Image: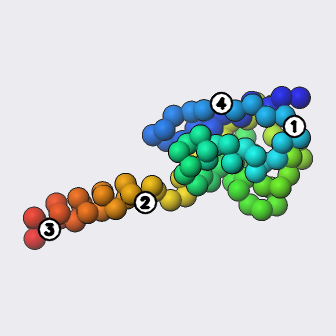
Amino acid sequence: SQFTIRVTLRGKGTKMFNFLGGNTVQDVIDKAEMDFDHVPLRLFDQASHRTINSDDIRSQTLIQAGFSTRTALIAEATRANPGAGLGQGAAGMGVYGTHI
């Protein structure tokens, strides 16, 4: 059967992915990370209230992991884009410095 996985990343929108039941959870993580600008993601399954990035779940097929054919995942970037982070940090320091 076909699985439609919806992944929502705050500030980046929602993307829909189609997988087969034999695909692994790792396949879902890889595809989502690739489509969201190669940012490492932590994925949270709203239905089962669990994070699916743990090693024991990653290696399971979607069927083994108990995914429904329509699964909604919330994505959270595990680290910011380093370039953007540095820029914001530097700008922040500058603003802070003027108030001393």
Mark sitting earlier along the chain (4/2): 4
Q: Residue at x 84, y 34 (%)?
A: 20
Pointer 3: what residue?
97
**Type of the residue with mark 3:** Gly
Mark whose residue sits in front, 4 or 2: 2
Residue highlighted by disc 4: 16
The quadrant in which the N terminus is found is top right
Could you tell me how far apart the alpha carbons at marks 3 and 2 are, in whole angstroms? 22 Å
Task: Report the Cα–Cα distance between label 1 and label 4.
Answer: 16 Å
- SS type, badge 4: strand
Counting residues from the start of the chain, the first of labels 3 and 1 encountered is: 1
Q: In the image, residue 7 lies at what x, y percent?
A: 63, 38
User: Considering only order in the chain, which callout, 2 or 3, is on the residue closer to the N terminus?
Assistant: 2
Q: How far is the residue under mark 3 from the one under mark 1?
A: 55 Å
Q: Secondary structure at mark 2?
A: helix
Residue 74 appears anywhere in the view? no
Q: Quadrant of residue 23?
A: top right
Q: Look at label 1 and name its amino acid.
A: Gly
